Image: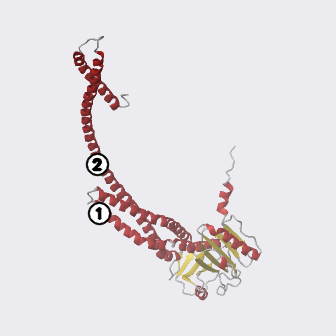
Amino acid sequence: MATFHPLRIELHQEIHARPYPRIASPTLVSHLAIFSDEKELQREHDAINELARIFQVNGVASDASSYFENFGRFSLRWENHREFSTLTLIQPLVEGDFNHQHPLELLPKGWFDNYPGEVISATSIAICAEYDEKKVEQYLGARPIVATHLIGDQATVWTSLQLDNEGFTRFFLIENHFGQNQLGRIVIKILEIETYRQMALLGLPVAKKIAPEASQMGQQCAAILEQMTSVTNPEEESQLLQKLTRLSAEVERLRAASSYRFAATQAYADIVNSRINQLEQERVQGKAKLGEFLKRRFMPAIRTCKSVELQLENLSKRLTRASDLLRTRVEHTIAEQNQKLLESMNRRSQLQLRLQQTVEGLSVAAISYYLISLLKLFLHGMNDKRFHFDESLVLSISVPVVVLVIYWLVRKMRRHLLATPEED
């Protein structure tokens, strides 16, 4: 019988893990994106649990990646996104007086000073139901240069996209009878646009730093390729191959150092574009649309990162092809040298064979001479009173027999030593 997968419930609950907040105007929303790594996760848990202890509410679980809790005067949302975390404070107001509200004044004094990480994005959104031009300009601190109707003119967002004295980017959102759930979705999308825009732009300094090195390496690669056409000796080929190898190592070092950042930049940029499209923007007369304004300044930076990434990738491919081509030439040169060496060894072998055959003839004569000498001594000792024979005649008959036998034995031994395993 089939059983349920152990991760079934966990995977199913993932779509409910981070619900949109319910927001009603007037409200002030303060949002911080904090750049950190997973090593700081426990310290973040400790800080949030300390805040929960002060306000006597439930804390965050040790294995949680998100947290939502009502702290009385405000609601707190904390989310961990591996590379960064976000803190969102939602503060309902009675009269909509936004100018006297500091984004972090609701937190205990000194609590945020001990929070781990570095703030990469800070956003504040004032939400009300009525448009007041003076109130908008007073809250933004400057004349808004961006204004956009959202979701079929059901809401309008105003911003100057300038940092205030506390380092926050301020938005003024005017909602027209939105439901609390829908208003919460709109607010989160605006916050995500600002957060992921900043995170995506982290790749731009990396691209600016790498671009001059990549261009210089491209020129070095072109110079090496040009030299390859005029190389004539193996020593120069080997030197060029070493240069290519060192250059390839440098290119791969740059790719390894930047690949994660560029991949993250592209992923964050895709989220920004998706959220902008989801807002269904319409132009406010005389003002720039939020999406158009951001894309006009945001997308060139993203294209710069992509351009440098492609430049490194193409340079790596060019160096690989050049290395393969040069390595083929070096291997061909080595093969020619080996062929010449084999021919030289073959000539030496033939010479050694002739010398061996000459030595064999001499060895046959020498061995035969010693054997006949021994035979002569033997016959001389046997030729006494009991045995009478012609010693000279026996020696004359024995000489060709001894020579032929020695020659046959030497030839047989040589054939045995030269025989192949198949012949054995």
Residue 66, above or below 393:
below
Return the residue nearer the eye: 42 or 309: 42
* Badge 2 or badge 1: first in the primary sequence: 1
Residue 251: give x, y in percent of width and height.
42, 64
Q: Residue furthest front?
A: 385
Amino acid type at circle 1 is Glu
Q: In the image, which is nearer the foreground, mark 2 or mark 1?
A: 2
Q: Which residue is mark 2?
A: 336
Quarter of the image for residue 209 reads bottom left
The residue lying at 54 percent from left, 72 percent from top is 199
Specify the label residue 226 is tagged with: 1
The residue lying at 54 percent from left, 86 percent from top is 143
Disc 2 is placed on an element classified as helix
Amino acid type at circle 2 is Glu
Return the residue nearer the eye: 78 or 413: 413
The residue lying at 28 percent from left, 18 percent from top is 379
Specify the label residue 243 is tagged with: none
